[in-house]
Structure formats: structure tokens, C-alpha cells
Amino acid sequence: MNLLETFRVAARALLRSKTRSFLTALGIIIGVGAVIAMVAIGDGARASVQKVFDAMGTNLLIVLPGSSSSGGARGGFGSQPTMTWDDLEALRTQVPTVRAAAPELRSNAQVFSEDQNWATSVIGTTSDYFVVRSWTAASGAFFSELDTEGGMKVAVLGATVVENLYGPGVNPVGQVVRINKTPFTVVAVAARKGQSAMGQDLDNTVFVPATTFQRQVQSQSLGNYIKGAIFVQARSADDTARAQEQVRQLLRERHRLGEDKPDDFDIRNLAEVASGQQESTRTLSLLLAAIAAVSLVVGGIGIMNIMLVSVTERTREIGVRVAVGARPRDILTQFLIEALALALIGGLIGTVLGVGVARLLAAQFGWPLLVRPEVALLALGFSGLVGVGFGLYPARKASLLDPIDALRYE
């Protein structure tokens, strides 16, 4: 009997009992679908986390001022101004691994257009801030260093602020807005960033030059001290850790801190935070994929059980085939083909089902749909391997049946 005829016989045997064939493949369907869906959701979650940190800026360090202490009560980092404008200039010019540095002075204020108003965050900074945060302008142009040095009353609006003051699709460049009671000319609209890792709307912000912020928005002057944080961008991702240490050493020297004194500032490395988030998501994805792989093995056991039942039911048929010239290897091949066909068909259906489930979950959580072809092929190949592995014992049992005993079997 040639291989093609063996395929035909195996196909007829499977089609004779469609319901049982489907139920036999159901474990494989669920296993492959689960593997593909879980891996796709894990990849989507990691991409979503990475997108959030990319929105905050690449190779980013955040330098926070020190903590305060009063009557035994200690405040957190940022509660005591310890960073100066001279520190900022030193970070820009004296640290070789730093590409740019910019202050972030933050306050809440009511912003007014001609007929609308909106409560938002106002950030005082320099032009380098948009470089550090990898922020582009959707329209207009960001204010320059000359605007900062001259204390110009210019503003950059976030997308959320524009929508609430002017409505969607309106370009407000050239318009005048009032922050509290001070008029500012809108020079640009910042490209949409979305949410931060903490769920904060990054687009609900107005940016103004730091010098103007200190005179017109900030409630009190701190002289040479910066009432806020400093954002630092390393020259590359590989330089981030080295830049962190160099920034730390420079600030300790400038603040004259002895070896026995702790830092009066704090440096947050977002690359480390993002890496931790990514690792947690990766571990969860691997756990879910491992659980899904177990269901594939369970599906293989189901195939073996049903194939053993099939061998028992078709004992007389096997005897007749052997009697008319079928060799043991023909019987072995036929049952292996049946097991392999069940596994592969189940794998294909599971692939479609897994992609569908991944699409639904991605839409539900707002994550990107990332289905890797190599994962689908690996899951499909593993399902075929499971089918052959668990179908081998029933097939071998069928091929070793004695033809005389098989013909007598009722």
C-alpha cells in the first residue's frame, strides 16, 4: 500500500466519526489557542509598558531635590529645594555622558481662552525639555532659549488643553490664552503623548519659559534654587547608568557632601523602572504560556486515549487489511497519520481561535495586537509533535495485532 492510499484510508476513518474527531482535537485546539493568545497578550502588554516609558522620554534620569525634616517629621524627596540653577548648568556642561538637561517647575492654574477655561498643569522649563522628553510639535514651533532668557510670555499647549479650550481639530497657534490673569501667546501645540505610567494625562499641560514661570506663575521665589525637578537625558541607552553615577558624583561635589553624609537629592532612572516592569510582564507571559503548553499535553493524552479506543473498535478491520496484504508498517503509518491529522487540524483551528481571542483582549485593554508568526508556527509544530508522540503507542499496538486473533474479534 502506498503512502497516498494510506492517507486516504486515514481520512475516511476520521470522517466516519466527525464528532468524535472534533472532540479528540478539542484539547489541542484549546492548547494552541491559549499559547498564541497568551503570548500575544504578553507581547502587547510589554509593548504598552514600553510605549508609556517612551512617552516620558528615552535614556531619562529625573533628579529630585532633597527631603525636609521638621519636628521629627520627614518629607519625601522634592519637599526641600536643594538643586540650584548653577547645578543645572553644571549638569549641561560638565558631565560628558549627558546630552541635555532641563528643569521642570510645576504648578496648577486656570487657563482661559476667549470663551472657555480649563484647569491644568503649567510647567516652566527651557527648550531642552522637549529634547529630553522626546516631544515634537504637532503645529507651530517650541519656544527657544532666547525666549527663556528674555522672559517672553509664550506658551505651548498640550492636546487635551487645546480640545477643552478651542475644541477638536482647531489650531490655536497665534491665539492668546491667559494663565491666571497673565496673557500668553500660543506658539505651538505639543504632539499627543497619552498617559504616564501612573495614569496621568501628559497632554493636559501648558509649557512656558522657566523665567516667565518664576515671575508670573510661581507663588514664591526661591532665588537661585529650583523649585522642582531636573530632567536629564543620557547620550545613549548604554550611557544611562554611567550618566547616573557621574551626575551623582558631580552633585555631591557641588553640595560639599562628605563621604559619611547621604545624598541631599534623589536620581530616578526610568530605564531601570521600565526594565523591571518589562521583566515582570515577561515572567507572567512565560507562566501563562507554560500553563497553555500543559493543556497541549493534556490534549495529546486525549488523542492517545481516543486512538486506543479506535484500535479496539477497528480490530476486525485491521485483521482484514493484514489478511489482504497490508504490512504492519502500513497499519502503523495509518494510525500515526490519523493522530497527526487530528493534532494539526486542531492546531490550525486553535491558531485562528487564539488570534481571535488575542484581538478581543487587546481591544478590551487597549493594547497593541502582536501575534508573532514564529510563535504560531512553533505552537503548530509542537501540536504535531504531540500528536505523533501520543499517537505512537496506539499505532504500534495496532500494527502488532495478530491477524488471526483480529479476524476472530467481535
Image: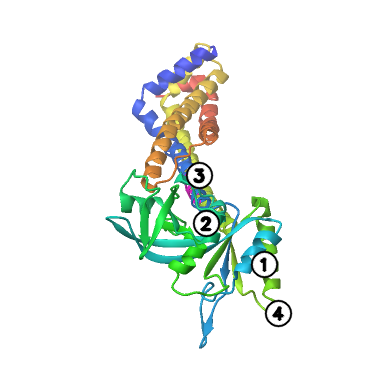
Q: Which residues are magenta?
A: 43-49
Residue 405's disc number:
none
Q: Are marks 2 and 1 in contact (CB under 8 Å)?
A: no
Asked whether, in this view, residue 149 is left or right of residue 110, the answer is right
- N-terminal label among 2 and 3: 3
Nearer the camera: disc 3 or disc 4: 4
Residue 147's disc number:
2
Q: Residues within 10 Å of mark 1 (few under 14, many from 20)?
A: some
The secondary structure that most of the magenta stretch takes on is helix
Q: Residue at x 57, y 73 (%)?
A: 225
Q: Are marks 1 and 4 in contact (CB under 8 Å)?
A: no
Residue bearing mark 3: 43
> Which amino acid, mark 4?
Asp
Nearer the camera: disc 2 or disc 3: 2
- N-terminal label among 3 and 4: 3
- N-terminal label among 2 and 1: 2
Asked whether the viewer can see residue 165, the reply is yes
User: For numbered disc 2, what is the local secondary structure?
Assistant: helix
> Which amino acid, mark 2?
Asp
Q: Residues within 10 Å of mark 4 (few under 14, many from 20)?
A: few
Residue 260's disc number:
4
- N-terminal label among 4 and 2: 2
**Residue 2: horizontal and vertical position, in percent?**
54, 12
- N-terminal label among 1 and 3: 3
Q: Nearer the viewer, residue 289 or 74?
A: 74
Q: Residue 367 in magenta?
A: no
> Which amino acid, mark 1?
Arg
Residue bearing mark 1: 248
Asked whether the viewer can see residue 217, the reply is no
Q: Residue 44 in magenta?
A: yes
Q: Residues within 10 Å of mark 2 (few under 14, many from 20)?
A: some
Q: Residue at x 65, y 62 (%)?
A: 91
